[in-house]
Amino acid sequence: MIAALQSLSFSAPWMLAGLAALPLIWWLLRATPPRPDTVSFPPTSILIGLKHREKTPVRSPWWLTALRILVAAAVIGALAGPHIKPPATASATLAQPLLVVVDNGWQSASRWAARRAFAEQLAVLADESGQTMYLAATAGPSAPLQPLTPVEFRQRFASLVPQPYPGDRAGLAAQVERELGARGKISVAWLADGIEDSGTAALNKALAGVATGGVIDLYGDPDGAGALALTRTASANAGPITAKVLKAESSPHSGQVAAVTGRGERLSVAPFDLKSGASSAEVSFDLPLDLRNQVARLEIVGEASAGGVFLLDGRSQRRRVGLVATEGNDDAQPLLSPTYYLERALTPFAEIVRPRTANLDVATADLVAAKPSVIILSDVGRLSGAVRERLRAFVEDGGMLIRFAGSRLEQGGDTLLPAPLREGGRTLGGAMTWTSPQTPAAFEEESPFNRLAIPKDVAVTRQVLADPAQMPRETKVWARLSDGTPLVTAARRGAGTLVFFHITANPDWSNLPISGLFVEMMRKTLEASPLQLSRATSAEAVPGDMQAAALGQDVPLKPWRALDGFGKLGVPGERAQPIAASAADMARVSAANPPGLYGPQNAVRALNTVQDGDAFAALKAVDGARVAVFTEAKTIALAPWLFLAALCLFLLDGIACALFLGRSAPRWRKPAAAALALGLVFGLVPESRAEARAAAPNATASASGLSREAAAFAMAASLETRFAYVLTGNAEADRVSQAGLAGLSRILSARTAVEPGEPIAVDPAKDELVFFPLIYWPVMANAEPLADHVLAKVDAYMKQGGLIIFDTKNEEASPESLLARGGRTPLAQLLGKLDIPPLQRVPDDHVLTRSFYLLQSFPGRWDNGDPWVEARQESGDAARRGVKSDGVSSLIVTSNDLASAWAMDDSDRPMFAVVPGGEDQREMSYRVGVNMAMYALTGNYKADQVHVPAILERLGH
């Protein structure tokens, strides 16, 4: 109580003289007016008997007088300007001269106001006692320890701010011993941040050496108010954004961590709860990718310090990657699919977007609309038409297109590659070559893969070669094999980048995709891509240092933005120095390298105060130190509260007069009736069930996205196994195709367990093809080139497991005409732009020769030789299929007019003669049709070794 009165002071104490007038006010309020004179007046005698119910008191009641005296006293006290100023905690322990040591690293920033107020108290006490003061700070520019007056101390401390890096206690200890060791004993007050570090022992020793009696007054934060720090784990890029809150003290603490954009907008808040004795707690933010990539920093709410902020750069953000693959059996044979290895390599640091269809035209349109940073094409051959133009615009607008080689690109590339390709590819280490598998060479300094370790067991057995004679000057080789041939090439195209891996994305051509190096190479490649596309006109629009930083080259990264001690991002100071890109990951914050963002604006690297693996310990007790807790001293003004009290008392006076002393006082006892509404009527009328039932079918139809005709076509094609034929516009040819497939269906029903329905005519431009396992496509002499969207649909059907029989129906034509891409033949005219893999004649051991019957030839109405199918691809010592759709070739090219040989009328009689073999040749053509149908339905089933004994036995007979 006495201490509180000692802390009471007034800004206008002379106003308290008005309190002396309170007794006079009391006397005036209690004064009785003089007694009236009595004058006889006879007519008034008639009023003697009247009684007045309401009487005016002679003097005011004592309690009302006291109330009014309190109003006057409160007003006088408020005008005097009273305020309470808490006394200094150190007033009883400090003697002169006084050395004030303050930890002003980032750990003290969140409680800096309390430290400043406490230092002000010390200055007030020193001013009253005439003390000389010294000020020493552990962080920031070093200043000589000179004697200061309290006024100078205030000015010096006002210019002192927390630094965004830890203080150097060891350096300050050396300065104290050097400059104050010979000055005699002084009092020491240490305003500590509560965090132990390697320099604490040295500073304790130095301060105890100059302190009177070797005793230090150590002041710290109260329990639960210590510094908090924020960091992220090294594996935090996978899944949600995950952060870790750290503390040194053992007391419990709870709070929130906010995810904030670069504009300071708070996107999400996650709570944390540090239990008693726990040193860390994790929080996570599960945000959609569009919001996730807007997060520029994480910060502890209410913790205004550089350690309470964690900055994010491009490495912490996830790219959206569109993945297009040509194969359709990812679920059935995932280990053979390139997407299996790409997805596992990219998932830790990217969001994978897969198209909803294998139609390359639709797939690329969907992916570009999803606004990815990167699109990856795995073994997609020549790009043409709308697909090529769409991807070209995507790259020129700043996107990155990554392509992987494969058998389709062995026939040559297109314009969306870093360099022209040689046709044919290159096999290393095969039985027919003298070369051995090649290993990757050490990455060059300019490569983004520089400093990546190359495992010794990584080898390449096959690759697609770039044509060195036609390689553009702007093409960069990011990786080479040991013989110098390119393994990864890249080139700028507009504002974007083209990247080409000269091997497949699965282990067919190399074991690189199953190594850890592949994951790191994909990570480095994605780091060179933008988070968001920005339109530019040319590669010159991107500064050279930005390109170098994005590609991971060892260039100096200049400070672009820096955090201050309170965790605010601003322009870096003059002392900030650049960081070498090669040392950015290992750099620690200091006065020369404060926390912040380094490098060009669009390719910054974040340097944070606290990094993964850091831990904090509470400051150890110093022997002989007097430990106390400083509080944030605030001057409390009492005048507003006194004015408020006077107003309340005045209102109470008015109410009392109205209720007890007025003429209508008795009426208050009769409570007035108030009409109140006791319930609310909720007039929400639910939708009737009948309307809901009526709306459900419409909603279902709308969700399907199919017209009534398309839905009927889909039902007819999918409820029963059916074959299809392509409408050519020639009525006679279409009639023969229908009769031929109908005849083949009857043969299948009679000889096998397959019972197909009636064949269906399809128009590839309008109808969906995925319902049919086999499509017969007669090629007419007047065939026109297919539109781009039709080519994309046909390409998707073939790559997803469908089988198309292209029949030129001409005894003088050869399937080799498909290879004439100049458009000189109807077949080349029709399919010249289709992404067709390498072809070969049906080998003797092909599954097509034994899928049901054992065949040695494949005649139809004509017998012009064997059909052509997709070629096998040799890889190492084992023969692997060039296709992955269950080992089935996606197309069969023949000129033997199969449909005419299969065609039957309603009486099951053949419609056309076959030459030159007659009915024996027709029987063989039926068997050819059965084998092709079984091949389309069962795939490489008969290629299994389990069938070899039965086949050998049949051959023996």
Image (cartoon, rainbow, N blue to C red):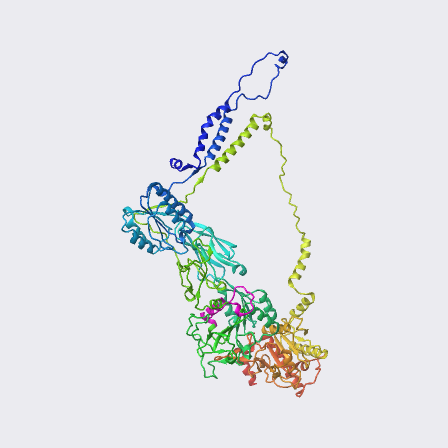
Q: Could you tell me if residue 931 is visible in this image?
A: no
Say left or right for 278 vs 916: left
Image coords of residue 30 (percent x, y): 50, 23
The residue closer to the viewer here, 595 or 862, is 595
**Residue sitting at 49 percent across and 34 percent down?**
645
Displayed quadrant of residue 19: top left
Q: Residue furthest bottom?
A: 916
Is any atom of residue 553 visible in this view? yes
Give residue 804's position: percent from left, percent from top: 62, 77
Q: Nearer the viewer, residue 234 or 534?
A: 534
Where, by quadrant of the figure, is residue 537 drawn? Answer: bottom right
- The answer to which of 862 and 797 lies nearer the viewer is 797
Query: 891 or 47: nearer the eye?
Result: 47
**In the rendering, at what x and y percent does residue 541 appear?**
53, 68
Asked whether 837 falls inside the magenta stretch, the response is: no
| Count of numbered circles in the view | 0
Q: Indicate the quadrant containing the C terminus: top left, top right, bottom left or bottom right.
A: bottom right
Q: Residue at x 47, y 83 (%)?
A: 431
| Residue 525 among magenta residues | yes
Say which quadrant the N terminus sits in.
top left
Q: Which residues are magenta?
A: 513-542
Residue 224 x/y as whole percent: 41, 48
Up/down of 796 relative to 317, above or below: below
